[in-house]
Amino acid sequence: MSAEKFRPVALRAPIGLSGKLNFYARLFLDLQVASVYRSICSELRHAKGEVLDVGCGSSPYRFLLSTERTRYTGLDIVDADKFDFRNSDIVAFDGIHIPFPDASFDVVLCTEVLEHVQHYQVLIDEMRRVLKPGGRLIVTVPWSARFHYIPFDFFRYTPSSLQQMFDHYTGVKIISRGTDVTSIVAKLLVIWFRNFVPAKEQFNVLSFFIAVCCTPVIPLLATWGHISSILPIGSSEDPLGYTVIANK
């Protein structure tokens, strides 16, 4: 199976001036990332106690947690560099079995990870096991997303499947992130960026020229994408992804 021909730079936390510029520019132009950020921001800002970030990557959302009210633990696989992540400040695991005792955490976060896990139900059950009674689970999964991190991308989950996957939790809420309008705009932005910053083997003079000519309208297009997600405008049955909020 061929590798990806287009892969955005891995998301990094907004540390320092250049880090903040890169992070918030990414939020503006990458509607998928923005939808995840928007859906978990309030939950993390109000979090308290022990927080476990499953499949944390470079821990891009850790900065949302209060350092006074929470203690953060990042968890990821040993060979996470195949997902473009190199984070030494993590606890390593096998990708399925979480190496902590029962009822260890008040909050478990897992963003855009489950699509890469073949035995996803085992991991979901493990996240519940390490949650304290009454603990909070925050999970995001993509829906309208390209085949990515090839070949380690296995699933897209419908709300029906998510309801079954998390049926042993309580107070389960499944939230659509964006609409079909948002998804269309997101695809257009990806096409623009893919041709504006092409890989060497993909460079096409005509496509690059068209992308450059379209650049002035990109801010308007991105703004419309954000508006369609926030209001929302369009159908929520074909969103960018879903966020699951649940309790143990």
Image (cartoon, grey):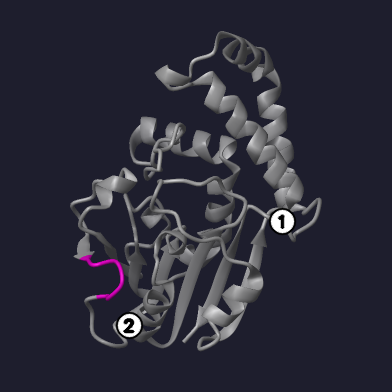
Residue 28 on image: x %, y %: 58, 37
The amino acid type, in three-letter code, at marker 1 is: Asp
Q: Is residue 170 magenta?
A: no
The residue to which callout 1 is attached is 238
Q: CA distance from mark 1 to mark 2?
A: 32 Å
Residue 67 on image: x %, y %: 32, 62
- Disc nearer the start of the sequence (1/2): 2
Q: Secondary structure at mark 2?
A: helix
Q: Secondary structure at mark 1?
A: loop
Q: Which residues are magenta?
A: 93-98
Q: Is residue 77 above or below residue 108?
A: above
Residue depicted at x 67% and y 33%: 188
* Labels 1, 2: front one: 1
**Disc assigned to residue 26:** none
Residue depicted at x 55% and y 45%: 146
Residue 215 on image: x %, y %: 64, 18
The residue to which callout 2 is attached is 130
| Label 2 Cα crowd, 10 Å radius (few <14 / some 14-19 / many 20+) | many
Q: Nearer the viewer, residue 159 or 153?
A: 153
Circles 1, 2 touching at the beta carbon (< 8 Å): no
Residue depicted at x 40% and y 38%: 2
| Label 1 Cα crowd, 10 Å radius (few <14 / some 14-19 / many 20+) | some
Residue 103 on image: x %, y %: 32, 87
Main SS, magenta region, reads loop
Left/right of residue 72 with respect to residue 146 in the rendered view: left
> Where does the N terminus fall, quadrant-wise?
top left
Residue depicted at x 37% and y 30%: 18
The outermost residue toward the right is 234
The amino acid type, in three-letter code, at marker 2 is: Val
Left/right of residue 29 with respect to residue 137 in the rendered view: right
Q: Is residue 65 above or below residue 14?
A: below
